[in-house]
């Protein structure tokens, strides 16, 4: 499974990257800012994980930029629980697969990773039968 991780906060980024690398079959590319969106233009990813800072619309702006050329790749937004509630209406509009609360809780993180793997496996089995 190929994942692009776009996160400014180094601690959060390292936690997510290390957690993903612990799971067999995960390939993680790390990038920052809007140059990361250009990386998404060049390579197909199963998931893009984008950090969103409270009070700054950078994460949502990156999702908007991504959705201009890619409506299919699943996005996970990493933010605070308060921001997740505020962005609930944007979630459906921008096709955000899930949110991950900051600070990262290990159980929540690995439950999300399990759901991500199941979803990719389901897409692969549908593609094989088509």
Image (cartoon, rainbow, N blue to C red):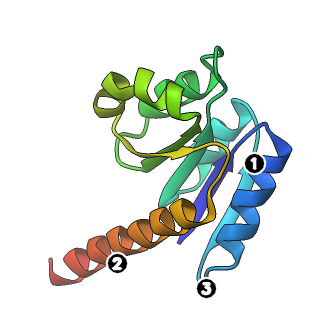
User: Mark 2 or mark 1, which is nearer to you?
Assistant: 1
Query: Residue 55 at what x, y percent from top left?
Result: 64, 14
Q: Residues within 10 Å of mark 1 (few under 14, many from 20)?
A: some
> Outermost residue, right direction?
10
Q: Residues within 10 Å of mark 3 (few under 14, many from 20)?
A: few
Query: Residue 52 at what x, y percent from top left?
Result: 62, 30
**Can you see residue 68?**
no
Report the side of 87 relative to 93 (left or right): right
Secondary structure type for disc 1: helix
Report the side of 10 relative to 109 (left or right): right
- State the residue position of label 1: 12
> Outermost residue, top direction?
55
Residues at marks 1 and 3, CA–CA distance in whole angstroms: 21 Å
Residues at marks 2 and 1, CA–CA distance in whole angstroms: 27 Å
Secondary structure type for disc 2: helix
Dot placed on the residue nearer the N-terminal end, 2 or 1: 1
Q: Residue at x 84, y 45 (%)?
A: 10
- State the residue position of label 3: 24
- State the residue position of label 2: 121
In the image, is residue 124 above or below residue 2? Answer: below
> Outermost residue, left direction?
130
Secondary structure type for disc 3: loop
Q: Residue at x 75, y 45 (%)?
A: 31
Dot placed on the residue nearer the N-terminal end, 1 or 3: 1
Q: 58 or 83: nearer the eye?
A: 83
């Amino acid at each position: 499974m190929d994942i692009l991780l776009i996160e400014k906060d180094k601690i959060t980024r390292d936690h997510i990257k290390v957690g993903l690398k612990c799971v067999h079959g995960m390939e993680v590319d790390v990038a920052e800012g809007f140059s990361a969106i250009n990386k998404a233009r060049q390579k197909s990813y199963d998931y893009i994980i984008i950090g969103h800072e409270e009070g700054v619309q950078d994460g949502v702006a990156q999702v908007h930029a991504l959705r201009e050329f890619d409506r299919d790749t699943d996005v996970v937004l990493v933010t605070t629980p308060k921001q997740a509630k505020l962005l609930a209406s944007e979630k459906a509009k921008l096709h955000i697969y899930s949110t991950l609360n900051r600070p990262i809780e290990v159980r929540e993180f690995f439950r999300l990773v399990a759901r991500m793997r199941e979803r990719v496996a389901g897409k692969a089995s549908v593609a094989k039968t088509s």
